[in-house]
Amino acid sequence: MSSLRQFKATDLFNFNAINLDSLTETYNISFYLSYLARWPDLFSVQCTPSETLMAYVMGKAEGTGLDWHGHVTAITVAPEYRRLGLAEGMMTLLEKVSEEPYDGYFVDLFVRRSNKVAIEMYKRFGYSIYRTVIEYYSGDTTEDAFDMRKPLKRDVDRQSVRENGETFRVEPHEVVF
């Protein structure tokens, strides 16, 4: 049995095993702390009964008007705890908080185009590709990202989704909320 709870600042000293995945973006400590201070209800961790960290999700609320939404900045599960449904539970919580109290129109996330496993998982969770962000990821090699979105109850006309989103290509500087 595991528990899902709000992330605490002291968790930063215990989540290296989760962050060692090559597909997980790693940030500096001040970045994590700024999210924790500003959006504590969108930053959660899954842990064992002995408080070993298994996974976390970090999000924020952003945008204006019809673009007001919840954003998944990072979600990752330690390798030994994958395929147990942890990601789905954490995403569901972030979606609920994005609806109430933030009253967002949708939840979005960015995923590497090559990360087929994650893309399929997000599709199972109800996300669809809204657009392709050209060379969004940089490093040793550049890579495109898919901006994937899931409409929330407030988006009654489903304006936050589009057909064939992978063919709609934008530059990173065009991604503004």
Image: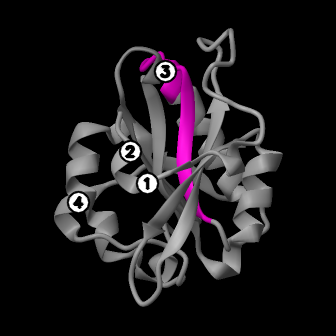
CA distance separating discs 3 and 4: 23 Å
Name the residue tied to disc 2: 174
Name the residue tied to disc 3: 104
CA distance separating discs 1 and 4: 24 Å
Mark 2 packing: few (<14 Cα in 10 Å), some, or many (20+)?
few
What element does badge 3 sit on?
Answer: loop
Q: Amino acid at mark 3?
A: Gly
Q: Is the C-beta separation of discs 1 and 2 under 8 Å?
A: yes
Q: Earlier in the sequence, mark 2 or mark 4?
A: 4
Please check the rendered image and state whether residue 152 is part of the magenta-colored stretch, yes or no. no
Which quadrant of the figure has residue 152?
Answer: top right
Mark 3 packing: few (<14 Cα in 10 Å), some, or many (20+)?
many
In this rendering, which labeled residue sits more in front, label 1 or label 3? 1
What element does badge 1 sit on?
Answer: loop
Name the residue tied to disc 1: 171
Q: Earlier in the sequence, mark 1 or mark 4?
A: 4
Would residue 127 be visible to someone looking at this image? yes
What element does badge 4 sit on?
Answer: helix
Q: Amino acid at mark 1?
A: Glu
Q: Earlier in the sequence, mark 2 or mark 3?
A: 3
